[in-house]
Every structure is written in C-alpha cells, then in structure tokens.
Amino acid sequence: MRVKTKRILFVYSMLVFLFFYIPMIVLMIFSFNDSKLGTVWTGFTFDWYFKLIHDEQIINALKNSIIVTMITTLIASILGTLAALAIHRYKFFGKQVVNFLFYIPVVIPDIVVGVALLAIYGWLHVTLGVPTVIPGHVVITTSYVMLVVVARLYGFDSSLEEAAKDLGANSWQTFWKVTFPLIFPGVLAGALMAFTISLDEFVIAFFNTGPGSGTLPVLIYSMVRKGVSPEINALSTIMIFFIVIMVLVVGKRMTQTKK
Amino acid sequence: MIKNIKLAYSLLSPSMLWLLLFLVIPVAMIVVISFTVSDGYGGTIYEFSLSSYKLAFSSFYLKIIWQSVLWAFAASVICLVMAYPFAYFIARVDKGKNILLFLVMIPFWSNLVVRLYSWNALLNDGGVINNILMHFGIISEPVKMLYTSFAIIVGLVYGFLPFMILPIYSSIEQLDKSYLEAAEDLGANPVKTFFRVTLPLTLPGIIAGFIMTFVPAISVFVVADLLGGNKLVMVGNVIRDSFLVEMNWQLGAALSILLMVLVLLSVLLFMKFTSSKDKKFLF
C-alpha cells in the first residue's frame, strides 16, 4: 500500500472510531454532572452513582438480570456443546434439518421470537415473570455456542481420543479426561458469547417479563422513555465497564488455556 | 456404527426439543393467530379469516413497512461505506491489530438501548452538537435533529455498524495477497487492482455484513422509539403496539409474518450475489 493511501485510511479509520466513541464518552461524562438536565455541565459529582446503589428498582432489575443470564448461559452452553459434538462427529439422517433449525435463531428477527413466545404464554395462561425470559434467551444463544464449539472441534486431533481408548479408558473417562479439556476453551468462548448476548438482550426480555420483573436493559428502556436522568448515564457507564472487564478477564484466561 | 447414531441423536435431542418447544411451535402459533379473528380485547376467536392480512396490507401499514425498508437499506449502505475502508485498515495494520479489534468489539458488546440513549444528549435541540455549532457561530439557532429521519438513520448506523465491520474484516484478512501481487505484476494500477481483484474477492464479506446489518435494522423498534419521537415509527413499533397497546394480536401476528417473509426474501436476494462456496462467511 502506498504511504499516501495508508495515511488517508488511517485518518478515515480514526474518524470512524470517533463516531463509535464520542457518544459513549459524552454519556460517561454526563454521569458525573451535577445538573439533572443532562445537557449543560454544571459541576462534578458522584451523587448519581450513590443514588443507584440505593435504588431498589435497579437492585431488583440487576438481580433479575443475573438470574436470567446465569441460567441462560448454563443451559445454552450444555445444549450447544452437546449438539456441536453430534454435528461435528456423526453423519446422520436429518442433519440438514438440524443445521437449518440452528440457523433460524441467527436470522429470525428477535421481535418475532419475543411475540411468538408471548402468544404461547398467553395461550397456556402462564404468568409472565423472570423465568419466562429464559426460554427465549436460550433459543437465541444456543446456536452461537454450537457454532463456536464446532469451530473449535475442527482443530481437534481425534487420535488423542483413540490413544486414550487404547490405553484402556472407557468412553466416559475419555470424554472427561481428554475430549472435554481440549474443547473447553471453545465451550468457554461460547459461554462468554451467550453471557454477553443474554445480559444485553432487550427485545425478548421486554415482551416476556411481567410487571416488576424486568431485566436491567428493560428497566433502562423504561427509565429512558420516562425522561432523561443522569442516573441512567451512571448505570450505563457501569454496564459498559462491567462487560469490558468481563471480556478482558475471560479472554485472557482463554488465551492462557490455548497455550 | 448404529450405537454412534443413537449417541448422535441423544446428544442432539435436548437442543432440538428446546428449539421445537420455544421456537418452532410458538412461531407456528403466530401463523395460526394471524389467520383468526380478534375479539378486540387481546383474545382470539378461532375462525379462519384473512382480515388481519387485509389490514396489514392497507396503505397505512404498507407505508410504514416501506419506510422501514428504506431506512434499513440506507443505514446498511452507509454502514458499508464506513466499514469497508475501516475494516481494510484494521486488517492491514502493522501492529496493534488486537487492540483495534477489541475497540470495535466494545460497542458490539454494549447494550443497544444505552448506546442509542447516548445519541439523545448529542442530537437534542439543546444538545452537544447544537451547542458546539452555535458556539462557533456556524448556526444561529438550534437545528432540529432529534426526532427526524436523520436521527433514525444515525441510530441504525450506530447500532449495527459493528455487524458490518466484522464480516468484511474477516474476508479482507483471509484474502490471498498473491492475487494482488499478480495483478500488480500484470500492470494493473492500485485503483484497478482494488476494483477488479480486492472488491470481488471480498464480496462474500460485504454480503454477509449487509445481511447482518439489514435484518436487525429493519426489525428494531428501540431506534424509532428513542430517536424518532411519536411520529416516526418502524414496523417493529407497530408490531409491539398491536400486541401490547391495541391488543390486536391478529394484526401483530400478521405483521410479524410479513416481517419474517421480508427478511427471508432479502437474505435470499443478497445471497444471490455470492457463489455457494463463498457462503461460509454468512455464519
């Protein structure tokens, strides 16, 4: 690449980065603003963060989010990993159908999943609450876990399993002592993906929660609709930092296990 | 071998069962509901009828659907223009590639509602952009930006730009450099090399990016909610309101089916531009 082209590309890319980050930085700055109006800077304060800790609604939504995300991640990781093992290893009748089923959640609009589940819950007279968010979240995250684990399995040396069997290990021992440790980084990557998707997911959570059982994104949405408050900025800032730290920590662990 | 097949099916059965119960059956339910009659209170009279489709195809809703298609398409095109040079830069940078990729991923991981909300403070009449422009005397009174089509397109671009960057990045990254060298050796100038070699070879990434941007952009309702005000709505907003406000599930179901068909058709249309061996970039 010529130097001039490189320079133009560099400037262009920095502008795109600015487009990404200026709104987020402005959001974070105003979380420390003294004024409630949120558009004019009047002074520095930590008040909004203190207010958050004492806001029962927010603590409650946080609890709901943690429950939904943890259970979703657990179920999606198990279902996705089992499916990945089957899809990667075996040729079986109906494989095309299985692949197709796993691709639906990737391309179907979230809103359709949300209203379809709402319709089923309504028909079965299920009361909406925190647990009713989980089925939809598992639906949209399992495919991603499956895809990530399958990608990891392609680099898998099956002679290691054969060696374990030759040395007298049974299938169960082979799986836990050889296969699982080798695919574990893939499972972890898939679980991380499920975790971040579920924690941030808004549309399905919006349609499938009852009053007072909303997750954090649902609460933020309703707060934003009621009006602008620096408390939302503070909450958003915390959420952004939380995700960044999570990904850094787990990502680091993943590269370590790869070695 | 028979034992293995049994094992394969038992490994698959939990996820298949889950998808059947919580995806296939609910969507089938929506299809059924769309052909029934509403009792006006959110209930269903199980009687075959096309009335909800007649309503969904009325000019009022068709206009909203068309408007959503246009906005989502415009946003996808803008995303492409922004993403291609950017992805090219990251793929070809000498050092710090991982940090740059990480910086792209942060907005990708952060909540959409939060990120859209941050534009509120920027586009407001008394917001940051108007304040800066007035401070430097470029404008004398605030320009209305929030609650316009402009705000909606900005929101769609901002929301889904990472989905365009990542597939394009991976297609540029995997591009075999020897093709570029060959073009150069045969006397093509850099511009010609780009349009005759690089661009066609990275087309699968572009198509994948287009699908991954267009599909969420056309079905999102938060963007119009937070940046479009009361007057500008997208098809997602109408679906939500049919289910939750107007309690006309039949109309909401019919519009959901239309949206699904629209998304499917656009995916098939975009895929027509790629050969079958290139489809691996899609997923």
Image (spheres, coloured by chain):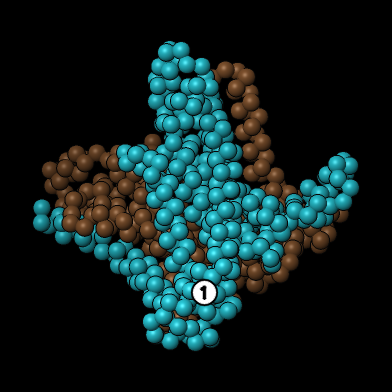
Chain colours: A brown, B cyan
- Relative height, residue B97 to residue A225 (above, below): above
Residue at left 50%, top 65%?
A111
Find the residue positioned furthest to the front. Answer: B59
Question: Is disc 1 placed on a helix, strand or loop?
Answer: helix
Q: Is residue A2 above or below residue A71?
A: above
Inspect this view and state whether residue A140 appears: no
Where in the figure is residue B196, as x and y percent of width and height?
A: 45, 25
The part of the image, by quadrant, that contains residue A213 is: bottom right
Camera-side residue of B190 and B112: B190
Report which quarter residue A253 is drawn in: top left
Q: Position of residue B65 (x, y in %)?
A: 55, 62
Camera-side residue of B199 and A109: B199
Are there few (<14), some (14-19), or many (20+) residues within 10 Å of tag 1? some
Image coordinates of residue A254 in percent, x first then y, are 43, 43
Residue position for label 1: B55
Q: Quadrant of residue A81?
A: bottom left
At 58% from the left edge and 48% from the top edge, which residue is drawn? B74
In this rendering, the count of numbered labels is 1
The chain letter for the residue carrying disc 1 is B
Q: Position of residue A219 (x, y in %)?
A: 62, 68
Residue in view at x 82 percent, y 55 percent:
B126
